[in-house]
Image: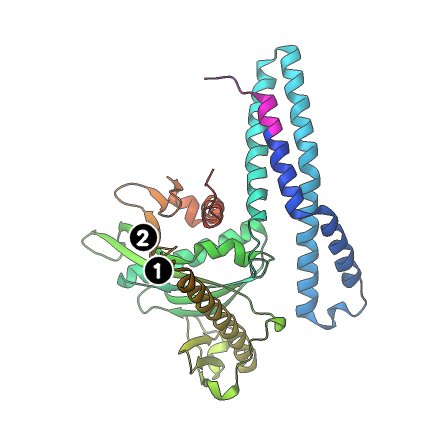
Amino acid sequence: MAATDFPAEISALRTTLGTIRAVSDPEALRRRIAELSDQASAPDLWDDTDAAQKVTSELSHAQSELERLETFEQRIEDLETLVEMAVEESDADTLADAEAELETVRKDLGALEVRTLLNGEYDAREAVVTIRAGAGGVDAADFAEMLLRMYLRWAERHGYPTAVLDTSYAEEAGLKSATFEVKAPYAFGTLSVEAGTHRLVRISPFDNQGRRQTSFAAVEVIPLIEQTDHIDIPENEIKVDVFRSSGPGGQSVNTTDSAVRLTHIPTGTVVSMQNEKSQIQNRAAALRVLQSRLLLLRQAEERATQKELAGDIKASWGDQMRSYVLQPYQMVKDLRTEHEVGNPSSVFDGDIDGFIEAGIRWRRGGTEN
């Protein structure tokens, strides 16, 4: 095995960090932190809970970003010192430690570099994610529930707050659909690469003959709407239905007609919400998601027009973007980036950062590595 060229590797790390700092603009971050700190210290901050949570969340995120930028230079200097010690003392163990630290710094810096690629119009928004069971019967419904748990575990690993807005349970097992929010800055930009059709191959636990089953689930990711987006929907374009919430257990939400279904008549877009306890809360949540979907629809129409004018009719995304194979071998593979791992259990437990980072690089025309 060739010896590591530490001077070249460290120089490359500094070049990458310089590029990240130029894009991230630490001085602008400091100014924003000062503004948010002033807002967070206002005595009437918590008079508006939603606004307060947004301010504190953005402040925490900005502080974390600045801290990461400021600590990387020190980490690279410490690595350089470690290498010098190892060479001077001809210490193989210290050199091995330097190798390990180089790999850790390279990986962490790569993850930070990916964040700089999230510069789309809505990438900084919170996200609304909907998972729907597709072809495959009860296995597909079970797969949809597995994906819901996967994303909630991913958010939990990162300390991102989530709220499940709606769940529609299948008759035998699993979910017909589920919608949830990820309440963290850049959640939309980060999770948007997860949108598409997911495929599961396994021995079906619901087949008494033990046959292999292929099932599908669709993942939709949209940015959370904000008041400044001006997506106004006339009342006469919305059909409102109320009904009794359904689900396992004996939740108090099941005792009244509190669930709400909104249908946007011109587009046929339907949003249901049932996880809040009051009809008013469910309607507000449903309207927020409906506005977000219409915003995304408007974006798609604009992009389609632009592509038509440019003569570019190539599809960027295939119908099937990732396969989860449990039988006859163990593998999860993204069909766009070729990123794959051989441990589906860890993936279903929320370890999907590698797939997300590869997807973001792929989408921006970069490479996985």
Whether residue 97 is visible here, answered yes or no, is no
Q: Position of residue 61 (x, y in %)?
A: 66, 53
Is residue 256 left or right of 146 when viewed as pictured?
A: right
Which SS class for mark 2? Answer: strand
Amino acid type, label 2: Leu
Q: Position of residue 185 (x, y in %)?
A: 61, 57
Q: Position of residue 163 (x, y in %)?
A: 54, 64
Determine if the magenta segment contains residue 2. yes
Q: Position of residue 16 (x, y in %)?
A: 60, 36
Number of residues whose C-alpha sits closer than 10 Å to that of mark 2, classed few (under 14), some (14–19) or many (20 or more):
many
Q: Which residue in the structure is indicated by mark 1?
A: 217
Q: Which residue in the structure is indicated by mark 2?
A: 200
Is residue 2 positioned above or below 263 on the image? Answer: above
The front one of 144 and 253 is 144
The front one of 343 and 104 is 104
Decide: marks 1, 2 in contact (CB < 8 A)? Answer: yes
The front one of 282 and 78 is 78
**Earlier residue among tags 1 and 2:** 2
Is residue 247 positioned above or below 19 on the image? Answer: below
- Label count reads 2
Which SS class for mark 1? Answer: strand
Amino acid type, label 1: Ala
Is residue 289 positioned above or below 85 on the image? Answer: below
Residue at horizontal 66%, vertical 44%?
22
Residue 225 in which image quadrant: bottom right
Whether residue 158 is visible here, answered yes or no, is yes
Determine if the magenta segment contains residue 340. no
Residue interval drawn in magenta: 1-11
Q: Distance of mark 1 from mark 2, alpha carbons? A: 8 Å
